[in-house]
Image (tube, helix red, strand yellow):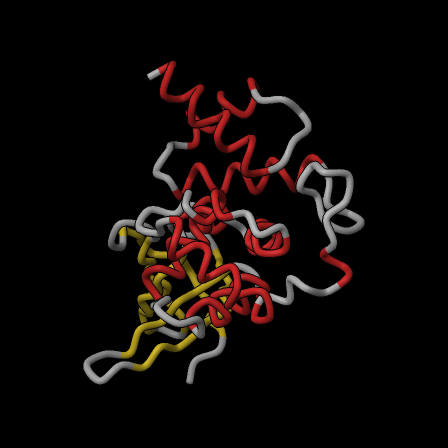
Amino acid sequence: MIGSLRGVLLDHWPWREHGAEVLVEAGGVGYRAVVPSGALARLGEAGSAVFLHVHTHVREDAIVLFGFPTREERVCFEALIGAHGVGPAVAVAMLSVHSPAALRRAVATEDVDALTLVPGIGPKTAARLLVELKSRLGADEPALTVVGGTGATGPGIGAEATRHDVRVALAGLGYGADEIRQVLGRLPREGAVEDLVRLALKDLAASG
């Protein structure tokens, strides 16, 4: 079982509705791995040195590698696919729209609307997932208690972390880097991730 991959990024292309497939050369061998769409910007251009935390998914007809820039994303992915009805494709879509911190906030605050931002997840499915993911994502731990009513959780989660989550969500929904950069400049500095994403989507729809 492959647990990590260090090498050179050779190429990437879209994977299903969300996510991307990357080709990483390590030791003269090219490995294909699926990553959340928001991870591409962090991996850099072709020729960049990359490191991925890997989940090896074994099926009857294939072995698929899912890669993540951080260990937290891989742990979150593994928690998601352990939930009833959540396969790897849905888990990648969720991590393309939400960072692990944003997902934990949504689960801790029982925010159905946040989960329905992920294409293919309706209100009923979101409500069921909130119950099932509460223990899997550790959202019932004291460190993740919501404070201040802004959607921030615990010490050290501030405006920059929130804007990072908004950036990841918009990238997961298919918006380009220039569009995201411009709309972020027009958003309020404070607010919950889910509220800022909704404002961003309204802004992008109006400007489009």
> Residue 188, image x and y in percent?
63, 22
Q: Is residue 141 left or right of residue 185?
A: right
Residue 97 in sight = yes
Q: Residue furthest top?
A: 207
Residue 5 in the image: above or below residue 40: below
In the image, what residue occupies the spot 73% across and 45% down? 157
Kindly identify the residue that appears in the image at 31 percent across and 69 percent down. Answer: 30
Residue 34 lies in what quarter of the image? Answer: bottom left
Above or below 5: residue 118: above
On-image quarter of the N terminus: bottom left
Q: Describe residue 75's horizontal placement relative to residue 177 as left or right.
A: right
Q: Is 208 situated left or right of 7 in this image?
A: left
* Residue depicted at 50% across the width and 25% down the height: 199
Instruction: Identify the residue shown where x is 39% and y is 67%.
Output: 66
Residue 84 versus residue 171 in the image, above or below: below
Picture quadrant of residue 136: bottom right
Residue 113 coordinates in the image, percent (x, y): 47, 43
Residue 6 in view in this figure: no
- Image quadrant holding the C terminus, namely top left
Spot occupied by residue 117 in the image (x, y as percentages of width and height): 42, 43
- Residue that protrudes farthest toward the right in the picture: 155
